[in-house]
Amino acid sequence: MVHPSRKIISSISSELEGYKLLLGVSSSISLYKTIDLCRELMRRGADVKVIMTKSASKLISPDVFKWATGNEVITHLTGGIEHVELSEEFNALIIAPATANIITKMAYGMADNALLATALNFIGKKKPIILVPAMHLPMYESPQVRDSIQKLKDFIEIIEPSIVNDLAHYPDLEYLISRIIPYVLRGKDLKGMKIIVTAGPTREYMDPVRFISNPSSGKMGVAIANEAEARGADVILIHGPISTEVKPFVSKSIAVETTEQMADAVLTNVERGYRIAILAGAPADFKFNRYFTEKINTHSNIPKLELELTPKISSVIRGKAFIIGFSAETAENDQQLIEKAKIKKEKHGFNIIIANNVSRKDIGFSSNKNEVIIISKDSIEKIPKSYKSEISRKILDYLKEEFKKEFA
């Protein structure tokens, strides 16, 4: 009989299908949040098992994690040499929360409990390990913990805590998922790449309150930026007024309003050495031929205005960067969409173009899902309706391969 909790597996997506993830839990009071982390990883296809320290099991019953995952929980080693078996069976180890005690002992190869012994085996087998520190801030900033983290960074992914007041908090769940999944699936395969990503709409103002824009939420561009940074790239996100529900997790971002501002920011950073530009933003194509410094009174004469073209961002960096462009088109079918995108690809000098059909109401603007066709120099691939996080992963996979070909 299938444990009832396991029925949630792949209920959101199947991106972790076939992956077995071991969740290590140490004795921070924030450990209750790992219950939600277990469930979210399962909803994305993972088979999750928990290993706890004895101290952690005094704060919360192992039965809670058995309920959450449908799997038995390990709290101590037996003659079954669980630390060896687990490191062979599971694809990755995620220790969340990781206490100061666990971090410092791991750094110096100590293995005095089941979790540490298992972690040492994972390290020896060069399997992915992710640490999520959580503790009081003075402990986190102590020389012993900082030195240990620095030592571990050579072979372990550290997801830094959220610093609030005097605490190094367990991070936001959505942020954790955005960092864990790319690392488990791809590691740091984009390390060394310097990538600009644009996201969201721009606004072209007629007066201080009225403007031309579009319904872009910025979700696609932000998903790409988050994924790229999680995979080791040096990322700058340049975004317009994105939706409040969109969460950029990148360390470097620039907020702009107009298309000209977006183009200037992209060019500036290309000239600073960012060789890849992913133009996922939706800048306004037109602007008004004049701007009124005061709000236009609707009781006055209606002004006669004309529209002018805004600068094409691709044109200011053409020949200076590897460019991935986007083509949001209305089309009756895939073939028509491909033909329109190919014309745009050649016209603007894109190395890769991502086409999507904005005629459909179930995907695209404001939706969490999309369906795209990726067109590169030598191939065309359709990505069926998927979450934008999954599509961003596929786009970056294409980027990695095409960039290698271009600059091999």
Image (cartoon, rainbow, N blue to C red):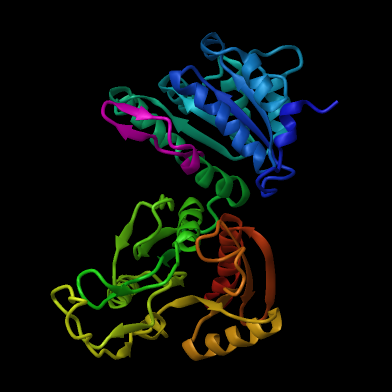
Pick the quarter of the image with the C terminus: bottom right
- Left or right: 107, with 162 as reference point: right
Residue 50 sits in which quadrant? Answer: top right
Residue closest to the far front: 299
**Front one among 199 and 353:** 199
Looking at the image, which residue sits at the far left?
Answer: 294
Q: State the image coordinates of residue 155 (x, y, percent, origin top left).
A: 51, 40
Q: Is residue 204 above or below residue 138?
A: below
Classify residue 276 by image quadrant: bottom left
Q: Residue at x 30, y 32 (%)?
A: 164
Give the mark count.
0
Residue 153's x, y, as percent?
45, 39
Residue depicted at x 67% and y 14%: 77
Along the viewing direction, whichever of 26 and 258 lies nearer the viewer: 258
Residue 173: x and y, percent? Answer: 49, 37
Give the extent of the magenta segment: 156-175
Answer above or below: position of 347 versus 296: below
**Does residue 164 belong to the magenta stretch?**
yes
In the rendered image, residue 401 lying in the magenta stretch gets the answer no
Q: Position of residue 236 (x, y in %)?
A: 37, 61
Q: Which residue is drawn at 38% across and 69% down?
A: 274
Residue lying furthest top: 58
Horizontal side of 151 relative to 165 (left or right) equals: right
Residue at 51% across, 20% down? 26
Quadrant of the drawing holding the N terminus: top right
Instruction: Identify the residue at the far right of this view.
Output: 1
